[in-house]
Amino acid sequence: MNDLARVLVVGATGGSGRATVEYLLAEGHEVTAFSRHADRLSGLSDQLTTINGDATSLDDVEKAVAGHDAVIVTLGISENPLCVRVFGPRNTAKNVRSVGTRNVIEAMVRHKVKRLVVQSTYGVGETRHRLRFMDQMFFNILLKPQIEDTEVQEIEVRKSRLDWTLAQPVHLTDEANTGRPEVSIHGAINNWKVSRQSVGCFLGQTAISPTFVHQSVALSG
């Protein structure tokens, strides 16, 4: 991939998504921010294009993917987890991760875009057995539907024929950027927190490089 790339960030207005957009712009890349309210990021840079759209709409995603060198997916539900568990999400599809990522993959195949980086969650898939007891309880009681959707999302990514990387951050914080997070391809971690800014740094760097292709990577502080 060229030193400077055109990168699409799907879910760009969430915490990790915005951090990824800001990192890529600071590095001089052309960035397209895609989310339902992507225009909230307008004015960040002349190198930024914003597209308002719904990741669960294949038509919306198709229009956004075309012409890019790489795609980063940071989809999720940002509402209060207790409210989501009891009442369901108010503003976001409950299967936004799996459906949105499936749409991204289909659009990438159609438009011959190969590089995909997807933010998942530590404790899903290969790292499921590494969760602490309290985290297991939190997942099972409050986040069960969201974790199940993330499991499906990972399956969609793994079975694709793209140059994919799955990033599994531990508990996300709003602390200041501490640079690149600790990275483990084996799932071992020493710290159960990591800043969104650090995760954004990793996602941006990985999308424009050939590293960690077809690997799941644990991210910690």
Image (cartoon, rainbow, N blue to C red):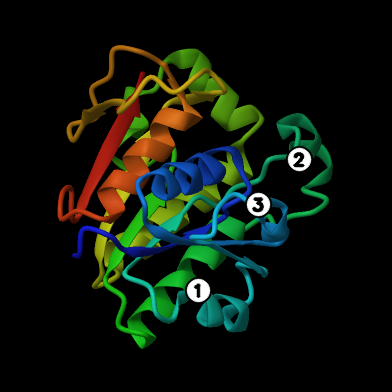
Crowding at dot 2, Cα within 10 Å, few <14 / some 14-19 / many 20+, comes out as: some
Q: Position of residue 58 (x, y in %)?
A: 57, 80
Q: Is 84 positioned to the left or the right of 3 in the image? A: right
> Which residue: 47% across, 24% down?
195
Task: Give the label on residue 41, or none.
Answer: 3
Crowding at dot 1, Cα within 10 Å, few <14 / some 14-19 / many 20+, comes out as: many
Mark 2 to mark 3 CA distance (whole Å)? 26 Å
Which of the pair 81/54 is nearer the observer? 54
| Amino acid under disc 3 | Leu
Quadrant where the image shows the C terminus: top left
Q: Is 24 positioned to the left or the right of 180 in the image? A: right
Q: Position of residue 81 (x, y in %)?
A: 71, 33
Can the viewer see residue 123 in this picture? no
Crowding at dot 3, Cα within 10 Å, few <14 / some 14-19 / many 20+, comes out as: some
> Please, what secondary structure does the residue beneath circle 3 have?
helix
- The answer to whether 129 is drawn above or below residue 42 in the figure is above
Mark 1 to mark 2 CA distance (whole Å)? 23 Å
- The answer to whether 178 is drawn above or below residue 8 in the figure is above
> Please, what secondary structure does the residue beneath circle 1 have?
helix
- The answer to whether 113 is drawn above or below residue 204 in the figure is below
> Which residue: 35% across, 13% down?
191
User: Mark 2 — residue?
Assistant: 84
Looking at the rendered image, the disc whose residue lies closer to the viewer, 3 or 1, is 3
| Amino acid under disc 1 | Asn
Mark 3 to mark 1 CA distance (whole Å)? 23 Å
User: Mark 1 — residue?
Assistant: 103
Q: Position of residue 168 (x, y in %)?
A: 37, 37
Q: Is 137 positioned to the left or the right of 208 in the image? A: right
> Which residue: 41% across, 16% down?
192
Looking at the rendered image, the disc whose residue lies closer to the viewer, 2 or 3, is 3
